[in-house]
Image: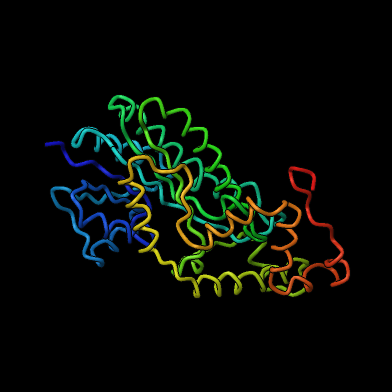
Amino acid sequence: MAAPKTVLVTGASTGVGLALGKVLAKTDYRLILTARQSSLPRFEAHELRESDRLRIRPLDVTAPEQRAAVVQEAERDWGGVDILVNNAGISYRAVVEHVSEEERLAQMDVNFRSPMELIRLVLPQMRAKQAGRIITVSSVGGMMAMPTMGAYSASKFALEGAHESLWYEVRPWGIQVSLVQPGFIDSDGFRKVRYTAKSGYSEHEITDPYHEHYVNMAPFVAWLMQRSWSTPESVARVILRTMRKRRPALRIAATPDAWLFGALRRILPRGVYHRLLYRALPRVSCWGPSPRRVMSLPAPKGDDGD
């Protein structure tokens, strides 16, 4: 009888990662659930305890030595990681002008560089077995961008591009690569968004040029999330189906709104698409120096020149 497959999940102490850990704990997979050291007590609080097939390990995904230690342990004791679920991530709320180089690199380090490094570590063993799955939790922000979330979207766009390339590269070894794209989820994730030094100031300073961007976008996003039918548990079920599917797609919409935005991008001319979303922004006529100037701004041109 074949040995159970080993699954490594990052960012497993909260949100989608925690929901996935609970689901997988009821299956016959061997699990390595990881989170930062300070977050490890959350597993016990949710009755996730170590056993002969469940290990809980500290992992700051930005720490090279911790990444290597977790992968090496899986190789030594369980023959390597069969399924890698890259879930850990952070998000900054800031307009492009309010993100310093240091803050931009911090965003990219967690959301892009670190998952790609984990992929690089598990690939040799997967190639040797000529089997394996890499599932990365991306976002609807990886196919469309919102104002005040530019650095976050940049990190997810980077993930999407790298995984599309990876899909071609490792296909000869039978390795499956998938991006799971959640949209708005009814969770407390929007409360954990980070502010840069300048964006935090702007949100509370009414004379700042971008003040209206922040005071309107933050409650708008919270409103969308609180009214979403999607939950961490529903996204976890999508990930589980992806793990079990014989030939999963490269990109998988994990929520109805992610599917809708994907359809709109495919169907609408790019100029129409951007104008439609711009007009849907909350109180956008109040953004900038004056309502007249804001409403007269041209929509960005699409790649097809429309």
In this view, the residue farthest toward the left is 1
**Snapshot quadrant of residue 141:** bottom right
**Snapshot quadrant of residue 25:** bottom left
Q: Nearer the viewer, residue 39 or 11?
A: 11
* Relative to 180, 224 lies left or right: right
Q: Residue at x 86, y 71 (%)?
A: 290
Q: Residue 34: x and y, percent?
A: 32, 50
In this view, the residue farthest toward the front is 267
Q: How many marks?
A: 0
**Snapshot quadrant of residue 260:** bottom right
Q: Nearer the viewer, residue 197 or 217?
A: 217
Identify the colour scheme used.
Answer: rainbow
Q: Residue at x 29, y 40 (%)?
A: 70
Q: Nearer the viewer, residue 35 or 83?
A: 83
Q: Residue 46: x and y, percent?
A: 25, 66
Q: Residue at x 73, y 74 (%)?
A: 283
Q: Residue 178: x and y, percent?
A: 43, 43
Q: Residue at x 78, y 74 (%)?
A: 286
* Relative to 19, 292 lies left or right: right
State whether residue 194 is above or below residue 111. Answer: below
Q: Residue 10: x and y, percent?
A: 36, 49
Name the quarter where the N terminus is drawn: top left
